[in-house]
Amino acid sequence: MDKVTHVVPKLHLTDHGKSASPRMEYPPPFPDSQLENLVSDIKDWQITHGSLLKLVNTDQDSTVLTHAVGACLFPTLFPKEQFEQALGLQKVYNKLYARVAEDEEWLYDTLKDDEFARVLWDIHKEVKKEGYVQDHSLGIFRSDYMLDANPAGQVKLKQVEFNTISCAGGIHSNLISDMHRHLQRRGAYVAAGLDDTTASINISASHLPPSHTLSTITSGLVSAHTLYGPPKSPDAEQTCILFIVQPRNFNIADERPIEYALWDQNIPVFRVELSPEILAHTSLTPTRELLYHPPSRAAAAPLEVSVVYLRAGFEAEEYSGPGCGDAREARVRVELSRAVKCPSILSHLTTFKKVQQALAVPGVLQRFLPSSGEAFNISSTFAQLYPMDASAAGLEARELAMDEEVSEGYVLKPSLEGGGHNVYGSAIPAFLACTPEEEWSRYILMSKIVSPTVQNLLMSPQGLYKGPVISELGVFGVCLWRRSGEAEGRVEMIGNTEPCCWSFKTKSKGVDEMSVVKGYGCFDSPALVDNDVFMACCRDDEQG
Amino acid sequence: MDKVTHVVPKLHLTDHGKSASPRMEYPPPFPDSQLENLVSDIKDWQITHGSLLKLVNTDQDSTVLTHAVGACLFPTLFPKEQFEQALGLQKVYNKLYARVAEDEEWLYDTLKDDEFARVLWDIHKEVKKEGYVQDHSLGIFRSDYMLDANPAGQVKLKQVEFNTISCAGGIHSNLISDMHRHLQRRGAYVAAGLDDTTASINISASHLPPSHTLSTITSGLVSAHTLYGPPKSPDAEQTCILFIVQPRNFNIADERPIEYALWDQNIPVFRVELSPEILAHTSLTPTRELLYHPPSRAAAAPLEVSVVYLRAGFEAEEYSGPGCGDAREARVRVELSRAVKCPSILSHLTTFKKVQQALAVPGVLQRFLPSSGEAFNISSTFAQLYPMDASAAGLEARELAMDEEVSEGYVLKPSLEGGGHNVYGSAIPAFLACTPEEEWSRYILMSKIVSPTVQNLLMSPQGLYKGPVISELGVFGVCLWRRSGEAEGRVEMIGNTEPCCWSFKTKSKGVDEMSVVKGYGCFDSPALVDNDVFMACCRDDEQG
């Protein structure tokens, strides 16, 4: 993996040697002192708004150190048309994935070769044998896109992946969006003086779409909680929402604000780890209410769980690692219960990249979206996707992937988890050479998205970077549905929120992976511009 | 200065060896696991709400580390009667100090021997020669109190000091108060199980007064800004508030939220350092409007300053240290201007402890508060205060201070700044012995306030402390007045806000100084109880 190599150790970023002809500069060239002020303003804003990460190794009894999460100094240019296209597609994507989740037959067929999917499938089977007692599911999804530039100089929106469990980054992006909007209103983006040879974009409030990610995610949870209604068990006096969280998470800033926002609406929220806390602190009544017994209220009445929101349980290691023996049992208990799950086990299964790839097979979308218009709009965002199994398409993909030159245009992705374990371009043949062939089917092959680059400054604990950057837009979808044999696609949509919530991440061009909390890339917000302005600002050089 | 010595390195704080008879325990005894959860909840809350301090030595271009500011795990018990007494007195204290500020003759007489006061007085004289053009002043005051226990077992409210410039701690306390209220609503203060030998106080929402410190301070600044009205200078298109701040402040969490709250009300706020930024980025028009020229908007119109809010300029070193040459000139420019000052130079002068001591001289209060009821209520909060000069009262004080035994009951305080440079009890005679006698008059002598101790757990980067603690309540007073020869005491009160804002700090009994940002003590909020409950919980032992 490339490291960020263009770290500028000091704040001497002023441009030198400008050409005589005027050209479009964004971000505007700032004198050093103005850039120093901007950096200082950003750090203070992040500190006072919790835009931070814990340094896990400093987490002691009485203290823990934090530093600001990586952030872009300026909002990054992004074409307005594609931003609106992505937001406009989300309600259809929500419907699509709800229907996929309720199509057991197709889902089983698609995922039957995946080891971790089988673990989850077995949980589903076990619960199905007892019978599900909750027909409703809450989806908090995130569809990720990048821009793809074709040789004709047009840009197109291409989907990177679709996530249905534990979608993160929304709160961080909400904060950075708020910050960029604050900096804009206080005039921090107006360059102190541009000479005649340079033009720039004067960022106004209308370039910066507001983010309502925190409130939208919170509203989704409130809807499901409200739908659940009062406690059914005579043992419980009130209901609560349960967050299942990972232990020692250093990225609490992306979870805790949702919890506080729910408490502000008088909805009790408690956090538990999947294992062993679920088994220790919950119980199922004979009629399958899930009761939560807070350890801090041993003598008091338990609460009945209305909604279980998973911010854990999405990694295979959480079920099979040392000390994880009971995680499967905990998940079974949750699924057996009457609580609304976000996501349900079937919905969780739709997050595998095998599903994304299988949906791209010609004709498949029509199974879930009979409207040809909807299917067309969705499929226009698909990159080329191949299985890596022994099917005809898989054998074709293997040929592409093993070719030293052709593989340059592809990414090999494990079916399960986005980002972290991808193999890029020319590294694919060597990787496959040392991977047993029977394991190849766990991967999919995807054509590389070649994004146009614009310029920005990125700030993270690793340093300041100035140069060409690439952004990824994640659109959050919040929806609540009921499984129903009579409804189209077995799904009755009860709530399908108009999306105005997104994550936006930007990395230096030289880095393949996009994971801000791991130190690759920064949280960001888009500065929306017309396509021609965007294209005029696309540049690949290291110094603006 | 004592260090915190009772640091408990690990979370094994469970009580052992309880006596057979039930006794009142507060905080309730928590099992280790519940205490660990509480600690974890508090750290996450502080991180996500900016209840933090910068580690200055880590402040680099692209990053800075932070840690949570010291906080009490539980709200500390405090008698409701004295809390309400303190809040109830604040409007009278506001009036008193506004009148003192407008009584030049008395103020000059009181402060004429103080070196730093003379520096400020000279600024006043210089401005007065030109003539003041702004009759209004904004006060954001803070009156600090501790509880004094007398041998009869009663507690009384005693004033520690009165601050009229750059009053800090309000935002931190607001945050910790919000946090304690959040923890209460989520049931974090209910002990998992008390045995029959122990009783405790079940903290409910009604014990915890809400803090409106941020919104009250912000409202005060908004009032002064509104009173100023539209720009008077044809060169300015809009008005703004200027914060004068100290460079490289690690405690930005106590300032920045006020700035953001003003921007949220569409009031532009800019931060400048006293020197050299004021001189570089402001100018006075011939009619004395103060114009601010933001460095980030060199080409744009300047803004006219409506209000100058000082969070700097209160230390002598800021005017006399290396590179401070222009600080005096900057302060003169601000005073000369039409902007409303918070505080004005005369109001700044009232913060000296010589003023506090002089007001305690019998008969003096009546000069400012002709109502005997008001004067009586105010004076009931005075500790014994003596000058250390060559007057009759001063000579008496010198005798007290030089006596090895008697001095135990006193604190020697420099006239200027609260907290940091006090000399306590038996250390006074030795301190005076090596201080030239001509400098003694810069100090005042104050009887030690002997606070009753209750129990709590304090958490700070230095460690966890469990044991007897002492609290200090600071009541914020926000008021706006006009100097007027015709009004009583030369002051026409335009706004005198009902106080519902306070700071609350708690330290271990063994520590003399109270300065949370320096690591002595923690921010806190009071759990208000009746006097008899408070007294029943007063205990001095190290382990509950």
Image (cartoon, coloured by chain):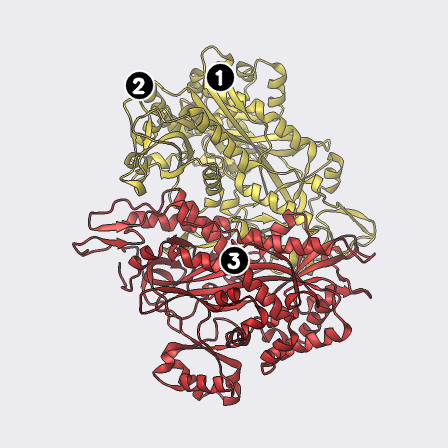
Chain colours: A yellow, B red
Query: Which circle, 2 or 3, is nearer the viewer?
Result: 3
Three-letter amino acid code of the residue under disc 2 = Glu
Circle number at residue A491: 1
| Discs 1 and 2 lie in a common subunit | yes
Q: Chain of mark 3?
A: B
Question: From the viewer's perspective, is A147 left or right of A313?
Answer: right
Residue drawn where x is 27% and y is 55% of the image: B12
Q: A163 or A344, which is in the foreground?
A: A344
Question: In the rendered image of this protein, does residue A202 appear above or below residue B16?
Answer: above
Please state the horizontal and vertical placement of residue B230, each as a whole percent of the image.
76, 53
| Discs 3 and 1 lie in a common subunit | no
Q: Chain of mark 1?
A: A
Q: CA distance from mark 3 to mark 1?
A: 53 Å
Three-letter amino acid code of the residue under disc 3 = Gly
Marked residue nearer the N-terminal end (1 or 2): 2
Question: In the rendered image of this protein, does residue B443 appear above or below residue B528?
Answer: below
Q: Quadrant of residue B62?
A: bottom right
Question: From the viewer's perspective, is A255 left or right of B187?
Answer: right
Residue at which label 2 appears: A130
Residue at which label 3 appears: B170
